[in-house]
Image (spheres, rainbow, N blue to C red):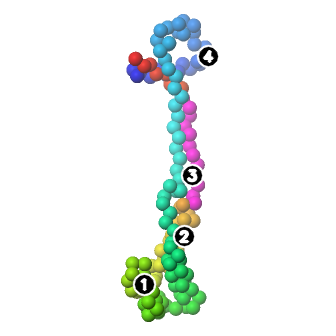
Amino acid sequence: MRKIVKCPENYSTVTESFRMDPFYESLIPHLEFSMEFQSNQLIYKKEYTKRQQIIYLLIHHLHDIEGWSYRKISKWLNQSGIKTHTGKNWFSSSVISVLKRKHERDLMNEQIRNQYFPSKVSKFEVNYYVFD
């Protein structure tokens, strides 16, 4: 490929003398454009395990419906033999974290992951290339 020649302004009115030129014979037209798109669906979405869902619902129930403090919930979970997902004992901060992270995750899924991005296509352009 040697150089790019732009399409004449009004291609239909190109003169016959230009068409007979050997240079014109070697021009190869190419349709060029660009496309831009965005999607949040390309991000891996890791689901909660059944165990994580049950623990969240249990903590949520004990805190919001029963009115237990975070410290009381952590003590009860430890006495019941329920460990964190890493196999450690519960602290009030880990109970708070479970509720907070679930809320943040739901918010992210609602606001960011489900956001719509329109696709954009540039103007189409015909360029002529000369190949040696």
- Residue 83: x and y, percent? 42, 84
Of badges 1 and 4, nearer the viewer stands 1
Query: Alpha-carbon distance for marks 3 and 4?
Result: 38 Å
Q: For the residue labelled by badge 4, is the local secondary structure a helix, a strand or a loop?
A: helix
Query: Which of the labelled discs sits on residue 106, or is there none?
Result: 2
Check disc 1 and give the amino acid type. Answer: Lys
Mark closest to the chain's N terminus, 1 or 2: 1
Q: Are marks 1 and 3 in contact (CB under 8 Å)?
A: no
In the displayed structure, would residue 7 be above or below residue 86?
Answer: above
**C-alpha distance separating marks 1 and 4:** 78 Å
Q: Residue at x 54, y 88 (%)?
A: 62
- Say whether disc 1 or disc 3 marks the residue closer to the N-terminus: 1
Is 18 located above or below residue 36 in the figure? above
Amino acid type, mark 3: Phe
Q: Quadrant of the N terminus?
A: top left
| Mark in front: 1 vs 2 | 1
Q: Is residue 56 visible?
A: no
Which residue position holds label 3? 117
Instruction: Tell me the magenta residue range.
Output: 114-125
Quarter residue 82 falls in: bottom left
Indicate which label's residue lies in the foreground, 4 or 2. 2
Dot placed on the residue nearer the N-terminal end, 3 or 2: 2
Circle nearer the N terminus (4, 2): 4
Alpha-carbon neighbours of circle 3 within 10 Å: few (<14), some, or many (≥20)?
A: few
Tag 4 or tag 3, which sits nearer the N-term? Answer: 4
Residue under label 1: 83
Q: Which residue is mark 4?
A: 12
Q: Residue at x 42, y 81 (%)?
A: 84
